[in-house]
Amino acid sequence: MGLDQRVTSRGERPTSFELEDFGPVSGREEEWRFTPVDRLAGVFAAEFSGTAAVTLAGTGSLPDGVKFEQVPRSDPRLGQASGPSDRAAAAAWAGFGQATVLSVGRGISVESPIELEVRTQGDGVAASHLAVWLEENSAATVIVDYGGGGELAETVELYLGEGARLRLLAVGEWAAGAVHASSHRARLAKDASLVHSVAVFGGELVRITPDVTFAGPGGSAELLGLALTDSGEHHESRLFVDHAAPRCTSRVTYKGALQGAGAHSVWVGDVLIRAGAVGTDTYEQNRNLVLVRGARADSVPNLEIETGEILGAGHASATGRFDDEQVFYLCSRGIDLATARRLVVHAFFAELVGRLNQPEIEARLIATVDRRLDAATQSLLTPTQQPKETLGR
Amino acid sequence: MTVLEIRDLHVSVESDEGGTPILRGVDLTVRSGETHAIMGPNGSGKSTLAYSLAGHPKYRVTSGTATLDGEDLLTMPVDGRAKAGLFLAMQYPVEVPGVTVSNFLRTAKTAIDGEAPPLRQWIKDMRQAMSNLRMDPTFAERSVNEGFSGGEKKRHEILQMELLRPKIAILDETDSGLDVDALRVVAEGVNRAKQTTGLGVMLITHYTRVLQYIRPDQVHVFVGGRIVEQGGPELADRLEEEGYDRFVA
Ligand SMILES: Nc1ncnc2c1ncn2[C@@H]1O[C@H](COP(=O)(O)OP(=O)(O)OP(=O)(O)O)[C@@H](O)[C@H]1O
Ligand SMILES: [Mg+2]
């Protein structure tokens, strides 16, 4: 029979590599209650007729000790992080043929970012599997760039050996209508450190579920997320940070701006501090900025603490509005609507983007934000729109 | 020489039940260098006049005209009115979380001038203007109006006015909520702008005190959505003594 998905504690929610263990999805389940599940029917059915390619961007040359390989399902490095915890993740696991593994050898530190591209091809749902494997005391920055349309069920496994340091940035600008369900599963050995960041633009439905497990003491994880959600888009982030080992630190900062009527964003942040995870220090926050009427941001922090011997545990969630009065105030000082929106959105994202600590990527993200903001502002100003949005015309 | 000319202005406020008429035929001319005090009871429509001229989307002009140097203000977008030289110091300045005062001011200055101000000069001007208004330099890095006290918000409005150098400024109860020292400092700011840039001022107020610092050329009594009487500064004193009873039908 199927797994019991009704449990409320995140620690007891079962995981399985078997698709059959997850029953059909109705949309009433806790993990699907915000999702337009109809759009994921193809992913849930796990009948994959499309393909997805993971390639190395640029010249394709890699430093010594770094390998980029296509491997069969039997490769022992696959499936080493936690297991799939929902039907989409199980479908992604069931569906891939070959996997891509990017590995960094023991003690090797790669300076410049390694950039990968994930693109879907053809019609039908595609599945893809990427594993980033960092051996002991290695360090790397990896950018995974997503694009194109289509439907994709995906797994990204991050395996960090003792003392390994990984900065991962998953950034996507999907075409209209694209559907992407992605399970990120990271496992951190003793003293490993992860900066995991996600930037989401476009698509029709993008749902990313990062799971981070501290498997040894002394690890640290910073999880950053940025989303700019437009009309008709559903962007969902569901995080799970599993403090299963002592003295680990986690920081979660997700920020979403919603700029179109009917835009919907979801953030669910589950943090579990298990009984043995003494000395844990965790803080998670989600901030949303709603730029127009008719957009909706759901935000659900969820902190479970099974030991009292921790350094700190907290969460915060807030949704603010850029309302007509603020628009009027800025415009009354000569600032046009497009610039006013930029000013407010830049301010909103500035600190988050700064934390990426990668000036080139910062500039790229801000440029994407601006381009999409300006496009949306233009559509606000077209005469077919509500005159109220256009201030003084 | 700039002229703001308001003729027979009728304005309704948009609400769920439709439009409610508030302004019922306002006539007023403000020229460079002139100061016009507008005094009237609560709810008489003074802020409505100010907001309508600045282009707040809540208000709908049903008839009449308002021009700045012959240009139709009422068809301009909000930012266009500011670029044309109009400034509104608001009765209730709006908080804009996350956006710093310094970033806001620089963006506004760039928008008004059509080019970014030279950085060094700009920083100097901003520091000077803040110090003139006895604003602590740390305000530059705070979010616009967020957590500002009532009086600090008003000073911040005048700071913007000084830096943006408009031709005509509407000060909507800028004197309310100011302590005696702040009132003097703010009045100095207004007088400085009058002297250096020939600013024309529409000064909406409930109190004669501010008129001792900023001398009005004319005082207008505003009741029921229109100007019902005008006179010299002595009219303000009379209002202070007698109230508005004789104007309210
Ligand atoms: N949405 C609305 N629906 C109905 N009436 C409104 C609405 N908004 C404002 N008003 C009314 O418009 C009138 C004029 O308001 P306004 O703010 O212009 O007055 P004011 O002269 O500035 O008053 P004060 O001296 O108190 O600042 C008030 O009676 C107010 O209640
Ligand atoms: Mg008022």
Image (cartoon, coloured by chain):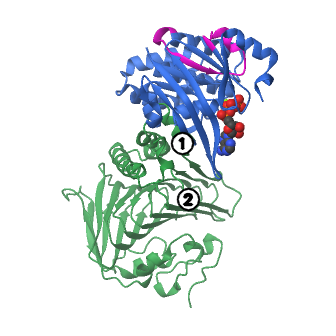
Q: Quadrant of residue A80?
A: bottom left
**Residue A301 position in % (x across, y down):** 61, 60
Instruction: Give the answer, above or below, for where A82 lies relative to A139.
Output: below
According to the image, label 1 marks what residue? B57
Where the N terminus of chain A falls, by quadrant? Answer: bottom right
Frontmost residue, A210 versus B180: B180
Q: Residues within 10 Å of mark 1 (few under 14, many from 20)?
A: many
Residue depicted at x 54% and y 42%: B57
In terms of secondary structure, where does tag 2 sit? Answer: strand
- Amino acid at pointer 1: Pro
**Residue A97 position in % (x across, y down):** 31, 80
**Drawing shade for chain B:** blue
Frontmost residue, A265 versus B110: B110
| Chain depicted in green | A
> Quarter of the picture for ligand 1?
top right
Q: Quadrant of residue A294?
A: bottom right
Instruction: Give the magenta part as a residue range.
Output: B195-218
